[in-house]
Every structure is written in structure tokens, then in C-alpha cells.
Amino acid sequence: MLTARTLTEAQIYVSLVTAADPEAPALVPARPEPGVNVTEGPDAWVFASQAGEITIPYASERAATAVGARFGLGKSQLIDAAQWAIVSASFARRALDADMAYTGAPDQDRTIVELNWEFAADAVSEAIKFLPEDADEVPDADIWSEYGAAAKARHPHLVSRAKLVDDLEYYRGTLEDFRALYKRS
């Protein structure tokens, strides 16, 4: 059985597996929903998903929540470095689209802009966790999925230190700029 660090990581994994499978129906993957597709066990939830059953230990979810690690502590065992870089870019595209459409009008919700920039930064931080301290890029061993390997083959610098760090700085900086421009009153 697969194990995720958090429910959010499990959901991201299911989205990636579904997107990478050309035979999968073009449906949005089901979200974890207690009593529907998430059951409680003695020490973990079990998420019954299109990608199979995924276990999420309560202790792992609690620890991640306590320190604000949206996707979990440590390196992912489900999602490889290249996949995290792809997820990050997807959230960044959503953030940029929402950011460009946002005018600050009273009827607009700024949360979608902020959340997407936050998710983009958090996801690229997950990819950075795979970088050895003195390495210029993530080792090939940390890109184990076909989807991740294909993405790296198409974009050789996808998991280079320079790109990942630049992306992180850009996402965080753009979020700060957005918040400064549209201060909450």
C-alpha cells in the first residue's frame, strides 16, 4: 500500500497519476472525503483513490500541520523531484492567471491568488528537498516515475538547483508583491 505524509500530498499524488495515465478518464480526481473515500484506522487514514489505497498516518499529518509543512515533513516517498517541479509550475500558472485577473475590486476574492502562489512555493520547496547539499541538480535516482523522467528529458534544467531556487524566490517574491499591492484593510 502507498503511504503519504499528508492528505494533501495524497491528493496531489492522485492528480499526478491520473494526469500521467492516458487511459484514465478525463475527470477531476476525487478529493479525500471522510466517510466517503477516507476511512479511519487505529493509527492512519486510508484514502481509497483512483491510484489505489493510500495510507496517511495521523502522526505524520499532525507533525506537518504543527510546523506548517503543507505536504509533509522530510522527502516524499510518493512524488519524485521532477513531479514536484511540475506541480509547482502548474500552481504558478494558476496563480499568475488569477493574479493578472485580480483588480482589487471589493467583490473579488484574493485568496485564490495567494493560495496558488503559496502552493507553488511549497511544491518547489518539496523538489528542493531532493537536492544534495553540494549538488547542482537532483540525482536521477530521485526521479523514479515515468512522468517525472519524461518531463526532465523534455526540460533538462527542470530540477537544477539554479532553476528550483530561482522559482522559489520568484513565487515568494511575487506573493509578497501581491500582498503589498493589495493590503488587507
Image (cartoon, rainbow, N blue to C red):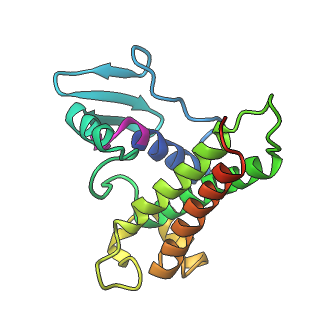
Q: Is residue 34 left or right of residue 162?
A: left
Residue 10 screen position, x and y as percent: 40, 40
Q: Residue furthest top?
A: 35
- Would residue 63 be found to the left or right of residue 139 on screen? left
Give the camera-side residue of 35 and 160.
Answer: 160
Q: Considering depth in this image, is 175 or 94 the residue closer to the camera?
A: 175
Q: Is residue 184 magenta?
A: no
Of residue 74 and residue 153, the one placed in the foreground of this image is 74
Number of labels in the image equals: 0
From the top left corner, tell me how far across and down residue 109 is, in percent: 72, 33
Q: Quadrant of residue 125?
A: bottom left
80 with respect to 17 (left or right): left
- Where does the image place residue 80, in percent across and percent down from the top left? 40, 61
Q: Residue at x 39, y 47 (%)?
A: 71
Identify which residue is drawn at 72% across, 55% down: 96
Residue appearing at x 16%, y 22% in the figure: 42
Judge from the rendering whether residue 163 lies leftward or rightward of residue 43; answer left or right.
Answer: right
Q: Is residue 159 above or below residue 7?
A: below
Picture residue at 78% right of the left edge, 33% below the top: 108
Q: Is residue 179 visible?
A: yes
Residue 60's x, y, as percent? 24, 40
Taking 43 as reference, is 144 above or below it? below
Q: Nearer the viewer, residue 30 or 100?
A: 100
> Quarter holding the C terminus?
top right
| 6 in the magenta segment | yes
Can you name the residue that lies furthest to the left here?
42
Residue, far front: 185
Q: Which residues are magenta?
A: 1-8
- For the N terminus, the image quarter is top left
- 49 over 100 or under it: above or below: above
Residue 131 occupies quadrant: bottom left
Is any atom of residue 23 visible in this view?
no
